[in-house]
Amino acid sequence: MFQRISERLSGVFKKLKGHGVLKESNIKDALKEIKLSLLEADVNYRVVMDFLDSVRTRAMGKDVLNSLTPGQQFIKVVREELAKVMGETWLGIELKGSPPFVVMLVGLQGSGKTTTAGKLARYFKNKGKNPLLVPADPYRPAATLQLEKLGQGLNVDVFSTEGNKDTRDICRKALRYGKGKLYDIMIIDTAGRLHIDDELMGELAAVKREINPDEILFVADAMTGQDAVRIAEGFLKGVGIDGIILTKLDGDARGGAALSMKVVTGRPIKFMGTGEKLDALEPFHPDRIAGRILGMGDVLTLIDKAVEEINKEDAAKLEKKLRKNDFTFEDFRTHIRQIKKMGPLDSILGMMPGFNEIKKKGFKVDDGALTRVEAIINSMTLEERRNPSILNGSRRKRIAKGSGTAVQDVNKLIKQHKQTSKLLASMKKKGFKRGINPFNMQGLFG
């Protein structure tokens, strides 16, 4: 995410940190390179110039020039101004008023509206809400089938259109149904086109008048850069939008849409799609995203993911076992599965401060490592998982063959388990501290 722009900016900051004192010439050179980086990332030209003016004004002040760490102060200014460009604070969806709270998704065909509808349903279900999905795209039969399949996988209800082709009638009946069944939120997946046209806007405006949605969210493909921004302006004028969801930010998106949307449209980015799976939807926190762009990581979002995906009861049980030095391969498998729920390993590590610099030095993330480890543990018998000391040579060969791995991989995992046991024994003697992290994967991949 934002890898190209992040790499360019990190080079700029590295030069600045090498100066014990910053001069106006240093700042001008840095701003010139930042300008090129942002324009290459397809950021709106007006947004870039306004951003640079704000940074220049603050950077030329005494707080930066007279600082003992001027390079760090300059980076701090850039981060704060980047956050302002993207909206400064996160504005989510607050369910208020009488239920159901109605969210209407709009956007062009192929932007990811249907998948996003499923992601939003999952997001609110995980928060204890009861969502209803509404397929309001009668022109693309696959859209209704896709939404029904997503609903089944999420165990979320999908309103039955029964072949109805009238979008206003579908939404009107769905709203009546949602009120009767006491759903908390109704998510409407509307029709799209390959481009904006009067017919599409007229239909969406008619649906808006019919049901008066609480929020209209524009779903934009971040891969299209400034095209997404221009399309957003079209929907803003034609229908009116309250916020934006950016999809495909996990791909080769240059960042232009994310850095331009708020300023150009005046509407906040509320969520971002970071993958194809239904759990790949994150709240868009401008301050955190600014940190990611500048290579500072995003520990707060990592913590949020851990809180959401890691079962508290399992974590508490695991901590007790760690305190007793009773950490078996069964426990190891449990916590591997919890980590996998948080998303791809590359994405998780990418939220750690300084990880981009490590990657530049040749470190490669093996997203299949966790799967291979789990396969090795699955190939063990129950007795072997609970009592690793019985794992002799012949057993290790059988496990390697059964898991499709090499004996060396099995030996490596067993060695790590022994090292972990020794560490736990040592910590037990010294006394455990509260809040021990049972998810330390150090040494697993190297």
Image: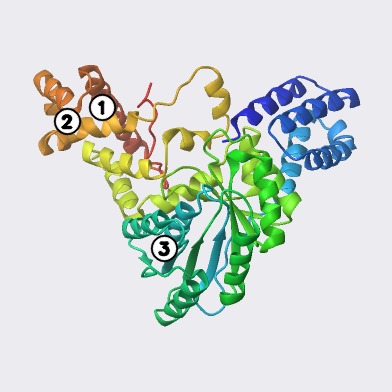
Q: Where is residue 305 in the image (x, y as percent from the top left)?
A: 46, 48
Q: Nearer the viewer, mark 2 or mark 3?
A: 3
Residue nearer the viewer, 255 or 377? 255
Q: Position of residue 145 (x, y in %)?
A: 36, 57
Residue 381's quadrant in the figure?
top left
* Within-10-Å neighbours for mark 2: few <14, some 14–19, many 20+: some
Residue 249's quadrant in the figure?
top right
Q: Which mark is residue 388?
A: 2
Residue flagged by tag 2: what amino acid is it? Pro
Residue flagged by tag 1: what amino acid is it? Lys
Dot 3 or dot 1, earlier in sequence? 3
Q: Tell me if label 1 and label 2 are in contact, CB under 8 Å.
A: yes
**Which residue does the numbered mark 3 point to in the structure image?**
125
* Disc 2 to disc 3, C-alpha distance: 40 Å
For residue 191, above or below residue 291: below
Q: Residue at coordinates 54% horizontally, 55% vertically from top-left? A: 192
For residue 170, above or below residue 432: below
Q: Residue at coordinates 28% horizontally, 43% vertically from top-left? A: 334
Q: What element carries label 3?
A: helix
215 sits left or right of 55 in the view = left
Q: What element carries label 1?
A: helix
Q: In which quarter of the image is the C terminus?
A: top left
273 sits left or right of 153 in the view = right
